[in-house]
Amino acid sequence: MSDHFYGKGDIAKVGKIMQHHPDLFKTMLEVAAKVMSEGALSVKVKELIAVACAHITQCPYCIAAHVKAAKAAGATEAELTEAILVAVNLASGAALAHSSVAFKAYEE
């Protein structure tokens, strides 16, 4: 095995899910396309939200794909930066909130 987990070509291995469950995979892609299409929120806003979420879930493939989609939808680098900072803020807030679990465990 290589010395890293995320090679550029590794995402192709997801195709194994498609091989074993093509109908479920197709349905997942259809849902994703509908969710990310224009609606009450613009595609650009949805992609910026996806960039922030991808930073929280820490998926490098999602980060790259949604950054490219956000850019294609007209997002600026400044907007991208703010979306990432929203994720940073939420992640640090979650860590801070979970400190209560640490202190509770320490006190028990």
Image (cartoon, rainbow, N blue to C red):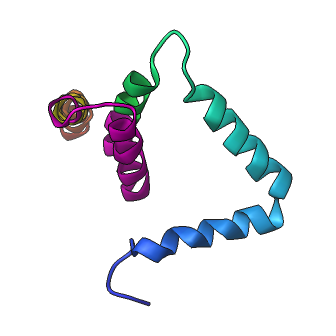
- For the stretch drawn in magenta, the main secondary structure is helix
Which residue appears at 68% of the width and 44% of the height?
29
Which residue appears at 36% of the width and 36% of the height?
70
Please identify the quarter of the rendering in which residue 84 is found.
top left
- Residue 17 horizontal/vertical position (percent): 72, 63
Split into 4 quadrants, where in the image is the C terminus? top left
Please identify the quarter of the rendering in which residue 69 is found.
top left
Split into 4 quadrants, where in the image is the N terminus? bottom left
- Residue 85 horizontal/vertical position (percent): 17, 32
Along the horizontal axis of the image, is 61 left or right of 105?
A: right
Q: Is residue 78 magenta?
A: yes
Q: Residue furthest top?
A: 40
Q: Is residue 55 magenta?
A: yes
Along the horizontal axis of the image, is 95 left or right of 46?
A: left
Count of numbered circles on the image: 0
Q: Residue furthest bottom?
A: 1
Along the horizontal axis of the image, is 27 left or right of 32?
A: right
Q: Of 75 and 53, which appears nearest the observer?
A: 75
Q: Compared with residue 17, is residue 88 higher up or lower down, i.e. above or below?
A: above
Q: Compared with residue 62, is residue 44 higher up or lower down, i.e. above or below?
A: above
Note whether residue 12 is visible. yes
- Residue 22 horizontal/vertical position (percent): 82, 57
- Residue 93 horizontal/vertical position (percent): 20, 28
Please identify the quarter of the rendering in which residue 20 is found.
bottom right
Note whether residue 57 is visible. no
Q: Compared with residue 41, is residue 31 higher up or lower down, i.e. above or below?
A: below
| Image: magenta residue range | 51-80
Which residue appears at 36% of the width and 49% of the height?
63
